[in-house]
Image: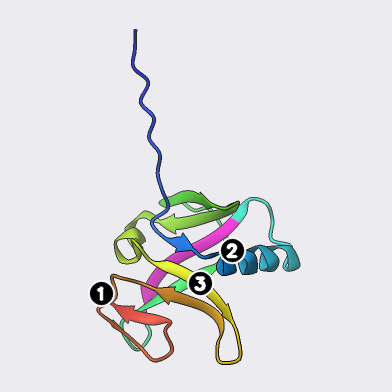
Amino acid sequence: MSELTLHLTEAPVKLTGGAINEIKTLMYEKEIPADHGLRIGVEGGGCSGLSYILGFDAKKDGDEEYEIDGVKIFMNRAHGLYLLGMEIDYLNNLNNRGFVFNNPNATATCGCGSSFSA
C-alpha cells in the first residue's frame, strides 16, 4: 500500500481583518478579474533600500500562490526571505488611513512606513 503525503503551505504573511475587508472592497469596486490576486512583494528603492509592492496582478512565472480568507495572494518566491512573518493591516481613523506593514525582518524603516532595510 502506498503512503499519501500531504503538503500544506501557509502564506508567509498575515492579513488582518481590516486589511482583508479593504482588499475585498477594492477588488469589488475596481472590478478586478477573477484570475487576478493581490501581489505582495519588495523592490529596490525608497529611502531605506527596499519598498513594498502591494497591488492587483495576474500570476507570473516564479510566483507562489496562497489564499487568505478568500483573497488570492501572489508572491515571487525570492521575496519570501524579506516578508516572512510580516503582518499587513489597514487603518482608517483620524490620524492614519491606509495599509500598514509590520515586518519583523526590517532592521530599519523610514518615516513613511513604506520602505525598509533588512
Residue at disc 1, secondary structure: loop
Distance (Cα) linking label 3 and label 2: 8 Å
As for residue 87 lying within the magenta part, the answer is: no
**What colour-coding does the image apply?**
rainbow
Please rate how many residues cluster around mark 1, counting C-alpha atoms within 10 Å: few if below 14, some from 14 to 19, many from 20. Answer: some
Residue type at numbered disc 1: Ala
Which residue is more in the foreground, 61 or 65? 65
Residue that badge 3 annotates: 89
Residue at disc 2, secondary structure: helix
Q: Which of the 4 quarters of the picture holds residue 27? A: bottom right
Nearest to the eye among marks 2 and 1: give it: 2
Mark carried by residue 53: none
Residue type at numbered disc 2: Ile
Q: Residue at x 67, y 51 (%)?
A: 34
- 89 vs 114: above or below: above
Please rate how many residues cluster around mark 2, counting C-alpha atoms within 10 Å: few if below 14, some from 14 to 19, many from 20. Answer: some
Residue that badge 1 annotates: 118
Residue that badge 2 annotates: 20
In this rendering, would 13 be left or right of 91? left
For the view shown, which residue lies furthest in the top direction? 1
Q: Which residues are magenta?
A: 37-44
Question: What quarter of the picture does the N terminus occupy?
Answer: top left
Distance (Cα) linking label 2 and label 1: 26 Å
- Asked whether the residues under the numbered discs 3 and 2 touch, taking CB atoms below 8 Å apart as contact, a structural biologist would say no
